[in-house]
Image (cartoon, helix red, strand yellow):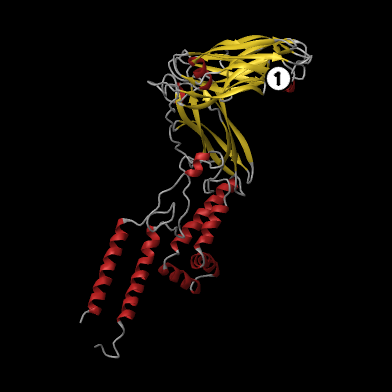
Amino acid sequence: MPSDTEPPRTVLMLLCLVAVGVGLSPLATASMGVASDNDTEPTPPDADVPDHTAAQAQLSSTTDTATETANTTTTPTTTTTATSTPSQTPNTTATATRTPTRTASSTPNTTATATRTTAPGTADAPQGLTVAGLSAPERLRPTEPYTVTATVRNPANETRSERIEYVFSGSTITNRTVRLAGGASREVQFELTASGELTGTETVSTGTYVHGVRNASGAGIPRYLRVTPDVDLAIEAFQAPATAPGDREFVVLATVSNPAGTTITRDVAYRLAGTTISEKTITVGSGEQRQVAFAVTTEQIEAADSLIQRGRTYDHSIETAGGATVSDAIRLRSEPSARAAALTTRDVQLPSDLREDTRYTVAVTVRNVGTTAFDGQFVYRLNGTAVATQSRNIPSGQQRTISFEIAYADIERAAQPLSTRTSTQSLTVGNASLASEDVTVHGRIADTDRHTESPTPRQAANFTNDPAEDPEASRATCERGFFSRCGEKAIDQMTLTLIGTLSSVVAILYEMLSGT
């Protein structure tokens, strides 16, 4: 039984733990990456520095002297000597000596801050121009010229000068030295060509690359750039009505084929009288065909070009970005036509399932019960996608049979990729449906995913993303240690060893105090 004067074991254990915590605090601070008072931000070695005036050079020299003096007076020995000097030296010497003594004895951070702010625009000023916006192409052909425009901003209050770089596939291709007053911004343009100079080869290969603009510290905005083959798509099989109705939409179709050995992505546009009415982007695999369809209204045409008039005939076409085109003539109707509500249907023939290497007949008998003739376009659709069209004129009181001969390949070109599932097929006039039924579409047995384009491997961006410009950047993560926050340094091996040793000492003391 311990005596009354023996301190409780619990108190001794707490004292040991407090001593261990006090001893570890500086080690943990150093190992977790906490900045000390003397830490300063290094200037990038390759930063461009503008020409200094004589006053700026003198100010820079004065700043360097002050910094060195503050560093020499941080030790207690130097401070004591400097304090005792004024009593034995003239006033001028005492004044010069007190200045660094007060600086060292007060807050060194104040001196460091003064050093950074007293020489704006010089090599001692921190670099920090930011890339706030980027306009860059997403697709190019080899040898095609292009322009990249970046918005550069100075978030500081003082003037700063920094090198802004254009980066392609991890390499700096060209740069501009930008000088901006505090709070100012400007656009910086880079004129380039998609050639081998970007990759250090004879020609730039097709594929997906990372390019963008960054500052000298590496922070910037990346973009993906796809270099496509220097081969254009071919276009044929144009389908369109000879007369465009004035009160409902009509559909224009064409078949696009890819003769190249790799997948090609192109912009395709519908144009009337030389004016682009609608545009979309399509991707066609090597040796494959795709159908492209545009649903257009006369109101949409008139909105695109106010000079277009109803009752007149115009040339219209479907064109690819590479110049391939297929065209015909169309008349914009001005007189009224019977509406789809005036049509009655019977003898509807629609397939129940769609299988490869098979042809199908889609038919419907239509009677015009209206008082005026019907002149319009019938469309066979699968899940809303136009597969085939047919324009017919049906006088008042008469009937016509509308028939489509459809091959599985036609459906595949229009509504790919196809997989085995239940879909909806319909016969429509404009936006009105005349007949609709479910149909089971069977995907290809041996090569179901033949038309599914495999994604092009993308290079990872090697400079800092801007979350506002790149959605993928907002999902980025960072490494962290067990005792450190995200972005800080983890505890090193030596510190962990010391912690383990001290923990063993505490355990031994505990055993000694608790022993009988």
- Tell me, yes or no, if residue 215 can be seen here: no
What residue is at 57 percent from the left and 35 percent from the top? 134
Quadrant (top left, top right, bottom left, bottom right) of the C terminus? bottom left
Residue at label 1? Answer: 340
Under mark 1, the amino acid is Ala
Where is residue 438 drawn, in percent x and y?
54, 25
Taking 33 as reference, is 292 left or right?
right
What residue is at 42 percent from the left and 19 percent from the top? 202
Taking 472 as reference, is 513 left or right?
left
Up the image or down, 38 lies above or below 398; here it is: below
Up the image or down, 228 lies above or below 391; here it is: below
Where is residue 73 drawn, in percent x and y?
45, 64
Taking 8 as reference, is 373 left or right?
right
Up the image or down, 465 lies above or below 437; here it is: below
Q: Residues within 10 Å of mark 1 (few under 14, many from 20)?
A: many
Of residues 265 and 452, which is closer to you in this image? 452
Quadrant (top left, top right, bottom left, bottom right) of the N terminus? bottom left
